[in-house]
Amino acid sequence: MQRVFAVGFSGDGSYVFSGSDDMNVRVWKAEASEALGVALPRERAKAAYDKALLARYKHLPEVKRITRHRRVPAAVHKARTWMTAVAASAVFVFVSVVVCCCLDPPPGSPAD
């Protein structure tokens, strides 16, 4: 798995470009379920109808859950969980050091 260093959208917002440390630029579709190529009028009508249905029923909990769902690979999920835990422990250590330093002045200080 390569590290991604840069990400950008195309001018019309239909593609995403990513640059990684292996010196490759990858092109992705911004809408993963969108088909490439020329769409027939029937296909365009169905896509418009589907978007209208989502807009009409977006207040329902089931529809909200489906539209928000994004699959995240297990390695990415584990890395995010680990980074969150590391950040939380760093904040805890910083707060405890600040509290300990404020409560107990070092010996020989003017506060004694």
Image (tube, grey):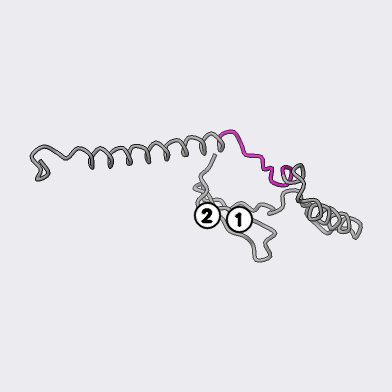
Q: Is residue 15 above or below residue 112?
A: below
Find disc 1 in the rendering and name its residue. 17
Specify whether residue 111 is painted magenta. Answer: no
Separation of marks 1 and 2 at Cα, in angstroms: 8 Å
User: Which amino acid type corresponds to the residue marked 1 in the rendered image?
Assistant: Phe
Q: Which mark sits nearer the N-terminus, 1 or 2?
A: 2
Please name whichever residue, 5 or 79, is drawn nearer the observer in this view of the structure.
Answer: 79
Q: Position of residue 17 (x, y in %)?
A: 61, 55
Locate the N terminus by quadrant: top right
Furthest-bottom residue in this view: 11
User: Which amino acid type corresponds to the residue marked 2 in the rendered image?
Assistant: Ala
Find disc 2 in the rendering and name its residue. 6
Specify whether residue 73 is painted magenta. Answer: yes
Please name whichever residue, 112 or 89, is drawn nearer the observer in this view of the structure.
Answer: 112
Count of all numbered marks drawn on residues in the image? 2
Q: Position of residue 63 (x, y in %)?
A: 77, 45
The residue located at (66%, 40%) in the rendering is 71
Instruction: Tell me: 60 left or right of 3.
Output: right
